[in-house]
Amino acid sequence: MMAKIVTRFGEIEYDPENLLHFPAGLIGLPHLTKFIVMPNKKEGPLFWIQSVDDPAFAFVLTDPTNFFLDYCIVPDSNERQILQIEEGDPCYVLSVVSVPPDQKISINLAAPILYSPKTNMAAQVILENSQHKSKTPLPQPKKAMKHQIISAK
Amino acid sequence: MLVLTRKIGEGIVVGDDISITIVEMKGGTVRIGIDAPRDKKIYRQEVFDRIAEENRDAAKWNMVDLDCLSKNITVSKVK
């Protein structure tokens, strides 16, 4: 049975069986536990998730290792418990991307989202004692610049 | 807010499984020791508040800006 919600991007139809679950919500937003993963219309590493609990909330996400190859976060035992996975189960890292109108895009490396594809569960964690910044500018990969030059011809 | 006065080495118990101890006081700074179960996340207030605010700010984006950006960012992963 498909369900529908009205968001600020219009009406979205979704399968309630196929949601991304944040059992603890996001940091400071504990009520946002269920999200629709929105397929990427445009090509590229960015996609977005739409809250089902509060239609006002949607977040742009990306796989940070697209931009920072050595960025690696491993869930601890407590985080594995939230994600309902065992040690060694696959766990991916996603980051919240800020997309302001001035296009000064930044990525939050200080509060990554751990995601288990096995259980469709996710948890946002704060890396308190690390060098990672919450407003890290998103570097333009060299390939993308080349692509731009070509398409500008 | 409950306000309690404590000396160095004294503590506070919160619920069944959290205890907080005053470890040291020096130059206007207080060092606090916290014993809590691992599943109780403990953050410095200002760090938590900043991430919470940035999450709320990150939710205020427009589709037109995302479309515009997605056009300009393409990634081919090199490992």
Image: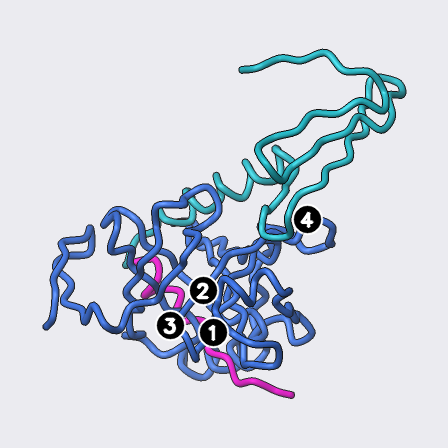
The chain containing the residue under callout 4 comes to A
A119 or B56, nearer to the observer: A119
Marking on residue B71: 3
Q: N-terminal of the two: label 4 or label 1?
A: 1
The Cα–Cα distance between marks 1 and 2, rounded to whole angstroms, is: 6 Å
Q: Which residue is mark 1?
A: A116
Q: Are marks 4 and 3 in contact (CB under 8 Å)?
A: no
Say which colour chain A has.
Answer: blue
The Cα–Cα distance between marks 4 and 3, rounded to whole angstroms, is: 33 Å
B31 or A92, nearer to the observer: B31
Q: N-terminal of the two: label 1 or label 2?
A: 1
Image depth: mark 2 or mark 4 in front: 2
The chain containing the residue under callout 1 comes to A
- Which SS class for mark 4? loop
Judge left or right: residue B40 versus residue A59.
right
Marking on residue A128: 4
Q: Are marks 1 and 2 in contact (CB under 8 Å)?
A: yes
Do marks 2 and 4 share a chain?
A: yes
Q: Which residues are magenta?
A: B64-79
- Amino acid type, mark 4: Glu
Residue at 26% x, 73% y is A18
Image depth: mark 4 or mark 1 in front: 1
- Amino acid type, mark 1: Ser
The chain containing the residue under callout 3 comes to B
Q: Are marks 2 and 3 in contact (CB under 8 Å)?
A: no
The cyan-tinted chain is B
- Amino acid type, mark 2: Ala
Marking on residue A122: 2
Relative image position of residue A35 (x, y in whole percent):
31, 61
